[in-house]
Amino acid sequence: MELNQTRNIVKTLAQGIHPTTGEVFPPDSPYNDPEVIRALFSILEGVKPAVQPRKSLEERRRQNLEFGRPGNTGLPWTEDDRATVKSGFLEGVSVEKLAADLERSSAAIVAEVIRQDLVPANLR
C-alpha cells in the first residue's frame, strides 16, 4: 500500500468516516472519541506525504511551453549549449537570437555569458 493511500485512510478515520463504505461512524464509535481523533491527526502530522516523482526533462520542457516559457527554461545546460553561447557571443550573434535558438530566456543567455567570463568585469 502506498503512503498517500495510507494517509487518506487515516484521515478518513479521523473524520469519523468508514474509509471503505463512506458511512459515518455512530457517536459511540471509538473513532469519534476526541483522544482517538487527536491521535490519528498526530499520526498524520508525523507521516509526510510521499514526494512526487521527478518529471522527465521532456515533461518539464512540455510544461514550460504550456506556461509560455522557453522550452529549456530551468533545464540543465549541455556542453554543446555552452559552446554555442560562447561561439555565438564571440561572433557577435545577438543575445535574443541565441535565446531563441537555444530555447532559453535572454537573461539565461546573459547569465551564461557572464559565467563563462566572456564580458570584462568592468562592463558587467
Image (cartoon, rainbow, N blue to C red):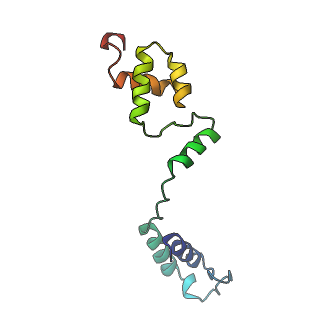
Image coordinates for residue 62, horizontal then vertical, percent? 60, 44
Left or right of 67: which side holds 108?
left
In which quarter of the view is residue 116 placed? top left
In the picture, measured across the screen, residue 34 lies left or right of residue 83, that is right
Residue 104 in sight here = no
In the rendering, at what x and y percent does residue 53 appear? 49, 59
Residue 24 vertical placement versus 69 (above, below): below
Residue at screen point 42% across, 36% down = 77
Q: Write the residue at 44% across / 31% down.
A: 81
Question: Furthest-top residue in view?
Answer: 122
Q: Where 88 falls versus 80 (above or below)?
A: above
The quadrant in which the C terminus is found is top left
> Could you say where residue 21 lies in the image, as x and y percent from the top left?
67, 84
The image quadrant that residue 70 belongs to is: top right
Question: Is residue 66 visible to the viewer in this orientation of the structure?
Answer: yes
Q: Nearer the viewer, residue 7 or 56?
A: 56
